[in-house]
Image (cartoon, rainbow, N blue to C red):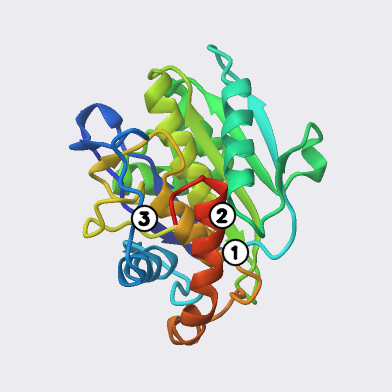
Protein backbone atom coordinates (compact mmCIF):
# COMPACT_ATOMS: atom_id res chain seq x y z
CA UNK A 1 0.00 0.00 0.00
CA UNK A 2 1.13 3.54 -0.69
CA UNK A 3 1.32 6.37 1.81
CA UNK A 4 0.02 9.47 0.03
CA UNK A 5 -0.47 12.49 2.25
CA UNK A 6 -0.14 15.67 0.24
CA UNK A 7 -2.22 18.81 0.56
CA UNK A 8 -4.07 20.49 -2.27
CA UNK A 9 -5.58 23.97 -2.48
CA UNK A 10 -8.39 24.35 -4.99
CA UNK A 11 -10.35 27.25 -6.39
CA UNK A 12 -12.87 28.98 -4.13
CA UNK A 13 -10.44 28.44 -1.25
CA UNK A 14 -11.18 24.71 -1.02
CA UNK A 15 -8.43 22.89 0.87
CA UNK A 16 -8.04 19.14 0.64
CA UNK A 17 -5.78 16.71 2.42
CA UNK A 18 -5.82 12.92 2.35
CA UNK A 19 -5.02 10.63 5.27
CA UNK A 20 -2.19 8.14 5.09
CA UNK A 21 -2.78 4.50 4.33
CA UNK A 22 -1.66 3.25 7.69
CA UNK A 23 -0.40 -0.20 6.68
CA UNK A 24 2.85 1.25 5.34
CA UNK A 25 3.44 3.97 7.92
CA UNK A 26 7.00 3.96 9.21
CA UNK A 27 6.33 5.20 12.75
CA UNK A 28 3.29 4.15 14.77
CA UNK A 29 3.09 6.22 17.95
CA UNK A 30 0.94 4.79 20.72
CA UNK A 31 -0.09 6.78 23.78
CA UNK A 32 2.20 4.61 25.91
CA UNK A 33 5.37 5.37 23.94
CA UNK A 34 4.42 8.92 23.01
CA UNK A 35 6.83 11.71 23.87
CA UNK A 36 5.10 14.18 26.19
CA UNK A 37 7.61 16.93 26.92
CA UNK A 38 8.61 19.51 24.29
CA UNK A 39 10.57 22.73 24.27
CA UNK A 40 8.97 26.02 23.29
CA UNK A 41 11.09 26.02 20.13
CA UNK A 42 9.89 22.53 19.13
CA UNK A 43 6.25 23.52 19.61
CA UNK A 44 6.65 26.77 17.68
CA UNK A 45 8.46 25.02 14.84
CA UNK A 46 5.62 22.55 14.34
CA UNK A 47 2.92 25.18 14.61
CA UNK A 48 4.31 27.38 11.85
CA UNK A 49 4.86 24.36 9.61
CA UNK A 50 1.29 23.00 9.80
CA UNK A 51 -0.80 26.15 10.34
CA UNK A 52 0.60 27.97 7.31
CA UNK A 53 1.10 26.82 3.75
CA UNK A 54 -0.09 23.77 1.81
CA UNK A 55 1.95 21.14 0.06
CA UNK A 56 0.30 21.26 -3.35
CA UNK A 57 -1.08 24.51 -4.76
CA UNK A 58 -3.72 25.10 -7.36
CA UNK A 59 -5.25 28.33 -6.08
CA UNK A 60 -5.93 30.40 -3.00
CA UNK A 61 -3.86 32.08 -0.29
CA UNK A 62 -2.34 29.78 2.33
CA UNK A 63 -0.08 32.25 4.15
CA UNK A 64 -2.67 33.21 6.78
CA UNK A 65 -4.25 31.62 9.84
CA UNK A 66 -7.35 29.60 8.93
CA UNK A 67 -9.67 28.55 11.75
CA UNK A 68 -13.27 28.58 12.90
CA UNK A 69 -14.33 31.72 14.75
CA UNK A 70 -17.63 30.24 16.02
CA UNK A 71 -18.86 27.00 17.65
CA UNK A 72 -18.22 23.90 15.53
CA UNK A 73 -21.00 21.35 15.18
CA UNK A 74 -20.30 18.00 13.55
CA UNK A 75 -22.91 15.93 11.75
CA UNK A 76 -22.02 12.27 11.16
CA UNK A 77 -23.54 10.91 7.96
CA UNK A 78 -23.15 7.14 8.08
CA UNK A 79 -23.55 5.43 4.71
CA UNK A 80 -21.74 2.12 5.28
CA UNK A 81 -21.02 -0.88 7.46
CA UNK A 82 -19.45 -1.36 9.88
CA UNK A 83 -21.23 1.52 11.57
CA UNK A 84 -18.50 3.66 13.12
CA UNK A 85 -20.77 6.51 14.21
CA UNK A 86 -20.11 5.78 17.89
CA UNK A 87 -16.34 5.74 17.35
CA UNK A 88 -16.57 9.01 15.43
CA UNK A 89 -18.57 10.59 18.24
CA UNK A 90 -15.82 9.58 20.66
CA UNK A 91 -13.18 11.18 18.42
CA UNK A 92 -15.15 14.45 18.30
CA UNK A 93 -15.66 14.44 22.07
CA UNK A 94 -11.99 13.73 22.73
CA UNK A 95 -10.81 16.57 20.50
CA UNK A 96 -13.39 18.91 22.03
CA UNK A 97 -12.18 18.13 25.56
CA UNK A 98 -8.57 18.85 24.72
CA UNK A 99 -8.82 22.21 22.91
CA UNK A 100 -9.58 24.79 25.59
CA UNK A 101 -11.13 27.56 23.50
CA UNK A 102 -12.94 25.49 20.87
CA UNK A 103 -16.65 24.71 21.28
CA UNK A 104 -16.80 21.38 19.39
CA UNK A 105 -19.63 18.86 19.59
CA UNK A 106 -21.74 16.45 17.55
CA UNK A 107 -25.18 17.49 16.34
CA UNK A 108 -27.95 15.22 15.09
CA UNK A 109 -29.32 18.01 12.88
CA UNK A 110 -27.50 18.31 9.56
CA UNK A 111 -28.82 21.82 8.98
CA UNK A 112 -27.10 23.08 12.15
CA UNK A 113 -23.74 21.52 11.30
CA UNK A 114 -20.73 23.31 9.86
CA UNK A 115 -18.71 20.08 9.67
CA UNK A 116 -20.13 17.02 7.91
CA UNK A 117 -18.33 13.69 8.33
CA UNK A 118 -19.39 11.16 5.67
CA UNK A 119 -18.64 7.50 6.42
CA UNK A 120 -18.41 5.26 3.34
CA UNK A 121 -16.83 2.03 2.18
CA UNK A 122 -13.35 2.29 0.74
CA UNK A 123 -14.60 1.27 -2.70
CA UNK A 124 -17.03 4.21 -2.66
CA UNK A 125 -14.46 6.91 -1.85
CA UNK A 126 -14.01 8.18 -5.41
CA UNK A 127 -17.73 8.06 -6.18
CA UNK A 128 -18.38 10.09 -3.02
CA UNK A 129 -15.72 12.65 -3.95
CA UNK A 130 -17.37 13.02 -7.36
CA UNK A 131 -20.74 13.60 -5.71
CA UNK A 132 -19.24 16.30 -3.47
CA UNK A 133 -16.99 18.16 -5.90
CA UNK A 134 -18.13 17.19 -9.41
CA UNK A 135 -16.58 14.69 -11.80
CA UNK A 136 -13.95 17.02 -13.26
CA UNK A 137 -12.65 18.15 -9.88
CA UNK A 138 -12.83 14.59 -8.54
CA UNK A 139 -10.68 13.38 -11.42
CA UNK A 140 -8.18 16.13 -10.69
CA UNK A 141 -8.09 15.14 -7.02
CA UNK A 142 -7.69 11.44 -7.85
CA UNK A 143 -4.86 12.10 -10.30
CA UNK A 144 -3.06 14.40 -7.87
CA UNK A 145 -3.36 12.54 -4.57
CA UNK A 146 -5.43 9.34 -4.95
CA UNK A 147 -6.87 9.72 -1.43
CA UNK A 148 -8.14 6.98 0.83
CA UNK A 149 -9.76 9.58 3.10
CA UNK A 150 -10.24 13.28 2.56
CA UNK A 151 -10.95 16.50 4.41
CA UNK A 152 -11.76 19.90 2.97
CA UNK A 153 -12.92 23.29 4.12
CA UNK A 154 -14.10 26.56 2.64
CA UNK A 155 -13.15 29.90 4.13
CA UNK A 156 -14.50 33.42 3.82
CA UNK A 157 -12.65 36.56 2.77
CA UNK A 158 -11.36 36.99 6.33
CA UNK A 159 -9.87 33.47 6.36
CA UNK A 160 -12.41 32.19 8.89
CA UNK A 161 -13.51 28.66 8.03
CA UNK A 162 -17.17 28.57 7.01
CA UNK A 163 -17.68 24.82 6.74
CA UNK A 164 -15.80 21.56 6.37
CA UNK A 165 -16.31 18.13 4.86
CA UNK A 166 -14.60 14.92 5.94
CA UNK A 167 -14.87 11.64 4.01
CA UNK A 168 -13.69 8.50 5.82
CA UNK A 169 -13.53 4.84 4.81
CA UNK A 170 -14.95 2.58 7.51
CA UNK A 171 -13.73 -0.84 6.41
CA UNK A 172 -9.93 -0.68 6.77
CA UNK A 173 -9.72 -1.66 10.44
CA UNK A 174 -10.10 0.04 13.82
CA UNK A 175 -6.66 1.65 14.01
CA UNK A 176 -6.72 2.88 10.43
CA UNK A 177 -10.12 4.43 10.98
CA UNK A 178 -9.06 6.10 14.24
CA UNK A 179 -5.88 7.47 12.69
CA UNK A 180 -7.74 8.85 9.68
CA UNK A 181 -10.59 10.22 11.79
CA UNK A 182 -8.30 12.17 14.12
CA UNK A 183 -6.09 13.54 11.36
CA UNK A 184 -8.89 14.51 8.99
CA UNK A 185 -11.06 16.16 11.63
CA UNK A 186 -8.09 18.09 12.99
CA UNK A 187 -7.13 19.23 9.49
CA UNK A 188 -10.74 20.28 8.88
CA UNK A 189 -10.25 22.71 11.79
CA UNK A 190 -7.42 24.55 10.02
CA UNK A 191 -3.92 23.00 10.18
CA UNK A 192 -3.95 21.80 6.57
CA UNK A 193 -0.23 21.53 5.86
CA UNK A 194 1.86 18.38 6.24
CA UNK A 195 5.49 18.18 7.27
CA UNK A 196 8.02 15.37 7.23
CA UNK A 197 10.44 17.27 9.48
CA UNK A 198 8.44 17.00 12.71
CA UNK A 199 8.43 13.42 14.08
CA UNK A 200 5.77 13.92 16.78
CA UNK A 201 2.76 15.07 14.78
CA UNK A 202 -0.03 13.23 12.99
CA UNK A 203 0.48 15.74 10.17
CA UNK A 204 3.64 13.86 9.18
CA UNK A 205 3.25 11.34 6.34
CA UNK A 206 5.38 8.80 8.20
CA UNK A 207 3.54 9.01 11.54
CA UNK A 208 0.40 7.10 12.53
CA UNK A 209 -1.15 7.73 15.94
CA UNK A 210 -4.82 6.82 16.20
CA UNK A 211 -5.26 9.38 19.00
CA UNK A 212 -4.93 13.11 19.69
CA UNK A 213 -1.29 13.34 20.68
CA UNK A 214 0.18 15.74 23.22
CA UNK A 215 2.26 17.57 20.62
CA UNK A 216 -0.74 18.17 18.37
CA UNK A 217 -2.72 19.38 21.37
CA UNK A 218 -0.14 22.13 21.76
CA UNK A 219 -0.52 23.08 18.10
CA UNK A 220 -4.34 23.13 18.10
CA UNK A 221 -4.51 25.03 21.38
CA UNK A 222 -2.24 27.70 19.92
CA UNK A 223 -4.42 27.89 16.82
CA UNK A 224 -7.62 28.23 18.85
CA UNK A 225 -6.28 30.65 21.43
CA UNK A 226 -8.61 33.69 21.37
CA UNK A 227 -5.75 36.03 20.52
CA UNK A 228 -4.88 34.06 17.37
CA UNK A 229 -7.39 35.27 14.81
CA UNK A 230 -8.24 34.21 11.25
CA UNK A 231 -6.20 36.09 8.69
CA UNK A 232 -3.14 36.62 10.89
CA UNK A 233 0.24 36.23 9.24
CA UNK A 234 3.09 34.12 10.59
CA UNK A 235 4.80 37.32 11.72
CA UNK A 236 1.69 38.35 13.67
CA UNK A 237 1.56 35.02 15.49
CA UNK A 238 5.29 34.98 16.12
CA UNK A 239 4.95 38.22 18.10
CA UNK A 240 2.09 36.77 20.17
CA UNK A 241 3.52 33.33 20.81
CA UNK A 242 5.74 34.14 23.82
CA UNK A 243 2.68 35.58 25.58
CA UNK A 244 0.19 32.80 24.86
CA UNK A 245 2.43 29.72 24.91
CA UNK A 246 2.65 29.56 28.73
CA UNK A 247 -1.17 29.45 28.88
CA UNK A 248 -1.30 26.74 26.25
CA UNK A 249 1.34 24.62 27.96
CA UNK A 250 -0.40 24.99 31.31
CA UNK A 251 -3.74 23.86 29.82
CA UNK A 252 -2.26 20.83 28.04
CA UNK A 253 -0.36 19.86 31.19
CA UNK A 254 -3.47 20.07 33.39
CA UNK A 255 -5.87 18.43 30.98
CA UNK A 256 -3.54 15.46 30.46
CA UNK A 257 -2.37 15.30 34.08
CA UNK A 258 1.24 15.64 33.00
CA UNK A 259 4.05 16.37 35.47
CA UNK A 260 4.99 20.04 35.72
Q: Which residue is mark 2?
A: 189
Residue at image point 63% right, 21% down? 86
Q: Earlier in the sequence, mark 3 or mark 2?
A: 3
Per the model, the C-alpha gap separating discs 2 and 1 is 9 Å
Q: Secondary structure at mark 3?
A: loop
State the mark number for residue 142: none
Residue at image point 49% right, 35% down? 181
Q: Nearer the viewer, residue 43 or 126?
A: 43
The x and y percentages for residue 215 are 39, 53
The x and y percentages for residue 191 are 46, 59
Where 117 sits versus 164, above or below?
Answer: above
Per the model, the C-alpha gap separating discs 3 and 2 is 14 Å
The x and y percentages for residue 57 are 36, 65
Label 3: how many Cα within 10 Å (few below 14, some 14–19, many 20+): many
State the mark number for residue 7: 3
Q: Secondary structure at mark 1?
A: loop
Q: Earlier in the sequence, mark 2 or mark 1?
A: 2
Q: Earlier in the sequence, mark 1 or mark 3?
A: 3
| Quarter residue 2 falls in | top left
Residue at image point 52% right, 66% down? 222
Are discs 3 and 2 less than 8 Å apart at CB?
Answer: no
Where 55 sits versus 4, above or below?
Answer: below
Q: Secondary structure at mark 2?
A: loop
* Residue at the front extreme, as displayed: 260
Q: Nearer the viewer, residue 258 or 187?
A: 258
Residue 253 shows in this picture:
yes
Apparent side of residue 84 relative to residue 122 in the rendered image (left or right): right
The x and y percentages for residue 153 are 57, 55
Residue at image point 32% right, 66% down? 39
State the mark number for residue 224: 1
Are discs 2 and 1 less than 8 Å apart at CB?
Answer: yes
Amino acid sequence: MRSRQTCIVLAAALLLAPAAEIACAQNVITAKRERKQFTDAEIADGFFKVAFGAEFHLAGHVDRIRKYDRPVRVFIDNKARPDRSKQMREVVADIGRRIEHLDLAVTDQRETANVVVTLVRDRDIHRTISAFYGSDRAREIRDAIDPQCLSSFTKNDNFAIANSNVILAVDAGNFVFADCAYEELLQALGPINDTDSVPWTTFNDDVSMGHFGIYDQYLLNILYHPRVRPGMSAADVRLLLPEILPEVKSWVTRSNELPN
